[in-house]
Amino acid sequence: MDPIARVQAPGLAETSKPILELRGLTKAFSGLTAVSEVSMSVRAGHVHGLIGPNGAGKTTLFNLVTSVFPPSAGTVLFEGADITGQPAHTVARLGVARTFQNVRLFGDQSVLENVVIGTYRNTRAGLAGGILRLPGATAEQRGARAEAMECLAYVGLADLADRQADALPFGQQRLLEFARALALRPKLLLLDEPAAGLNDGETEALARLIDALPGRGITVLLVEHNMDLMMSVADRIVVLNSGFKIAEGTPEAVSADPAVIEAYLGEEETQ
Ligand SMILES: Nc1ncnc2c1ncn2[C@@H]1O[C@H](COP(=O)(O)OP(=O)(O)OP(=O)(O)O)[C@@H](O)[C@H]1O
Ligand SMILES: [Mg+2]
């Protein structure tokens, strides 16, 4: 979407408040502090980037936001409410979805079933109803399948709905995970290196998908090493290094920031 269209998107005035706010977020593992006193906010209706060298703490920060584990210190606010330490399924139900750095799919299930699983937070009968076939689940199951098909169509995989997930090439598996995250109807979508392993054409297609999400009411927090992709979609970028936030600003500003350049040069020297 071009910037003008984004500015003119309906409801932007109310959506430019922070949807996610991190205050002094810290995660210590034995002997190592992976995330150190990170404060940042993600404004609704935007694509926000999170970059940093390998081991900077990006995935750990995602794990804190999605409550894979609790922080050692600090607070996570979602839509102004403190969700620190809430169970992961509660955070998901509030509208936070993610994809994983290493694709996680049910490989022996069909493409469609992998996305149907993502829709269950929206159905009354829920996952148990789907599995146990409780009364009332059937109509919802049909709805869930229709919704899953829409998500597959959005990422261009509708024709492959009946294929087994692990029969797809890697690039399409990443898109499938993307579709499953969308099926949760998230307000905030965390994408952890979605372009890793994709070819140039797939990466360009992904950039268009990500760029269109704010127009669909989905705010994005994107971790990505592909700087061309990051520069083309992010409005604002936070830079982590060794767990600390070292810079924040527009893509142009952070890419010219000496501390950021030094952090990445340091990485090259150690590789
Ligand atoms: N569950 C864990 N237990 C112990 N240490 C961990 C755990 N998860 C991450 N770490 C360590 O925390 C640091 C940050 O890791 P993290 O995966 O968050 O980095 P990253 O920025 O996502 O890196 P990459 O770009 O390589 O994905 C690393 O030193 C990592 O080894
Ligand atoms: Mg990572």
Image (spheres, rainbow, N blue to C red):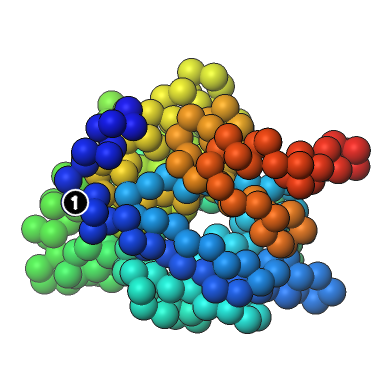
Amino acid residing under circle 1: Gly
| Between 84 and 41, the one nearer to me in the picture | 41
Q: Residue 102: x, y in percent?
A: 59, 47
Q: Residue 248: x, y in percent?
A: 59, 51
Q: Is residue 21 above or below residue 114?
A: below
Residue 241 in sight: yes
Q: Residue 6: x, y in percent?
A: 28, 37
Query: If the image is split into quadrants, where does the C terminus sit?
Result: top right
Occupied quadrant, residue 198: top right
According to the picture, the residue beneath numbered tag 1 turns out to be 11
Mark 1 crowdedness (10 Å alpha carbons): few <14, some 14-19, many ≥20: few
Q: Residue at horizontal 19%, vertical 64%?
A: 123
Task: Give the side of residue 172 with respect to residue 143, left or right.
Answer: right
| Between 127 and 76, the one nearer to me in the picture | 76
Task: Tell me the SS state at disc 1.
Answer: loop
Q: Residue 195: x, y in percent?
A: 54, 34
| Between 261 and 192, the one nearer to me in the picture | 261
Query: If the image is split into quadrants, where does the N terminus sit?
Result: top left
